[in-house]
Image (cartoon, grey):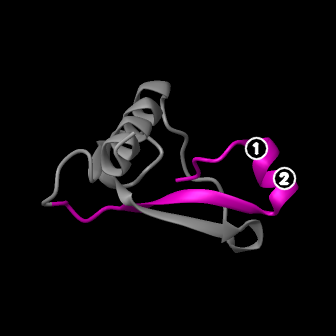
Amino acid sequence: MILSHTVFNENSGTVITVALTSKEQKAGFPLTLEINSKNLPKKSWIKISQIRTLSINRLGNKVTHLKEEELARVIEGLNEIIGG
């Protein structure tokens, strides 16, 4: 899941992401967050603790879009993990 803003992505040539998995997670929030998207074929979790910066050249097709509430929970989880 891409977290970074479009302006950042376009100017830097990179995106800031968190991992997405369909494997049920043992760790709960703030390390993972279950998301509900009609566009994903399986129940999925965002692995908030797995942050990566990737080249935009490595991206494939857009799969889904987070609801505002889900994005807010991801940010909340990041803040808990880093002590913000």
Res. 43 in view: no
Kindly identify the residue that appears in the image at 57 percent across and 47 percent down.
3
Q: Amino acid at mark 1?
A: Thr
Horizontal side, residue 40 vs residue 45: left or right: right
Residue that carries the numbered disc 1 in the rendered image: 6
CA distance separating discs 2 and 1: 6 Å
- What residue occupies the far bottom of the structure in this picture? 58
Q: Which mark is residue 10?
A: 2
Above or below: residue 1 compared with residue 23: above
Secondary structure under tag 1 reads helix
Secondary structure under tag 2 reads helix
Does the magenta-highlighted stretch encompass residue 11? yes
Hey, which quadrant is residue 22 in on the image? bottom left
Q: Amino acid at mark 2?
A: Glu
State yes or no: discs 2 and 1 in contact (Cβ < 8 Å): yes
Horizontal side, residue 84 vs residue 4: left or right: left
Horizontal side, residue 50 vs residue 4: left or right: left
Question: Residue 57: x percent and y percent?
Answer: 77, 72
Above or below: residue 14 compared with residue 81: below
Question: Residue 29: x percent and y percent?
Answer: 22, 45
Kindly identify the residue that appears in the image at 49 percent across and 26 percent down.
68
Give the magenta range.
1-25
Kindly identify the residue that appears in the image at 28 percent across and 45 percent down.
34
Q: Which mark is residue 84?
A: none
Characterize the local packing of mark 2: few (<14), some (14-19) or many (20 or more) Cα atoms within 10 angstroms.
few
Hey, which quadrant is residue 6 in on the image? top right
